[in-house]
Each structure stands twice: as structure tokens, then as C-alpha cells.
Image (cartoon, rainbow, N blue to C red):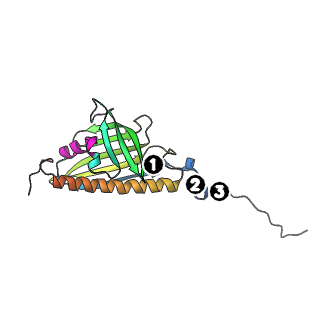
Amino acid sequence: MNANTNTTTATPATVGEHDPFEALDASDFTFSRRAWVDAAPARVYDLISDVSAIGRWSPNASDVTFDRGAGPRVGAWFSGRNHKDGRQWTTRSQVVRADPGTAFAFVVGGAEDGIVQWSWSCHPRGRGTVVEQSWQLLRLDSVLGTSRGDLDALRDYMTDSVETTLLSLAQWIAENPAVTGRSGR
């Protein structure tokens, strides 16, 4: 009898090896960014809650409009065109928070079954406002990607987009003092 008999025990694959979509947690794909802008919180809120203006600042969204008769209030719906990697698509979103001068948020796909929540908040700081924009993945959906790598890349892409949007908003406000309630210096 040979005492050196080798036995092999099967080791289950780890999440890292196969990265099953079902094992991912949507809450891992959330971020916030902030920028100071030279306008009062109430004026900043007016700008960001006017969804038709987002194309001025966002590198990825255009042709955003509230449904007929709707406006920046909870429950209102709007549509917008998105652009990424040479592709275009239209999304439907629903306002889930509308606190004038303070916070505005909407969910892509609607409050009941949405995929992503976009939030804006305004905090007075000195003579201006710190604007915070957040992106939160609410649930996994294969339309956004099917692996951690896909979702990490999407989050990174959206982080860059938010940073560009906030910088563009700050620049637009600086270049349009009459519209934002500031007189020139």
C-alpha cells in the first residue's frame, strides 16, 4: 500500500474568478462630488432643477425636457437624451425630491423601479454655495453592465461626467453674473 496517495479536493470558485453579476452589491457603485459656485443656494437650485438646462453643463446629456405641464416637483417626469461611446439613447426620469434652495433628486426609470438616482444638494458657503452632486446605483441591471469591471468602469465614467458638470456649472455661473443674481466685480 502506498502512503503517498494524493487526493484532490475541489475548491469552489471565488467571486473574483468568475465575478457573477448576482453576487455584486449595487451600493458599491455610488459616489458624490462637490464644487463651490458663486451664487446663492436658491439660485443654484433654480438652475439645477430646470432640467432643460443640464445640457449646458453635462457632457453626456442633452435635449432634457419635463413632460407637458410638469416642472421641478416630486412626481414629475422628464425625458432626456444621453450620449456615451458614440451611442445615444433616451431615458425617462422622475423627480423624487424637490426642496427649493436645498435639494433636487430624480430617479432614471422612475421612483418605483428605477436604476440610478441623481441627487443635487446646495449648502451656503461664504458668498456662494457648495453644490454636491451624487450618483447612486439603485439596482443591478444588465443594461449597465454584467460584471464588476463593467460597473466599475461605468461608475468611473460617471464620476468624470459629474466632475465636468460641476466645473462647467461653476464656470457658467461665473460668466453669467446677471442671470445668477451677482453683479460683476
Q: Horizontal and vertical percent for residue 31?
A: 38, 53
In the rendering, which numbered label is found on residue 145? none
Name the secondary structure under disc 3: loop
Give the Cα distance between marks 2 and 1: 16 Å
The quarter of the image holding the N terminus is: bottom right
- Dot 3 crowding, Cα within 10 Å, few <14, some 14–19, many 20+: few
Asked if labels 3 and 1 touch by Cβ distance under 8 angstroms, the answer is: no
Q: Which residues are magenta?
A: 41-53
Q: Earlier in the sequence, mark 2 or mark 3?
A: 3
Name the secondary structure under disc 1: helix
Residue at (34% x, 47% y) in the render: 61
Name the secondary structure under disc 2: loop
Q: Which residue is mark 2?
A: 19
Give the Cα distance between marks 1 and 3: 23 Å
Q: Nearer the viewer, residue 150 or 64?
A: 64
The quarter of the image holding the C terminus is: bottom left
Residue at (28% x, 46% y) in the render: 54
| Quadrant position of residue 50 | top left
Q: Horizontal and vertical percent for residue 130?
A: 23, 53
Left or right for 4, reference 54: right
Q: Which residue is mark 3?
A: 13
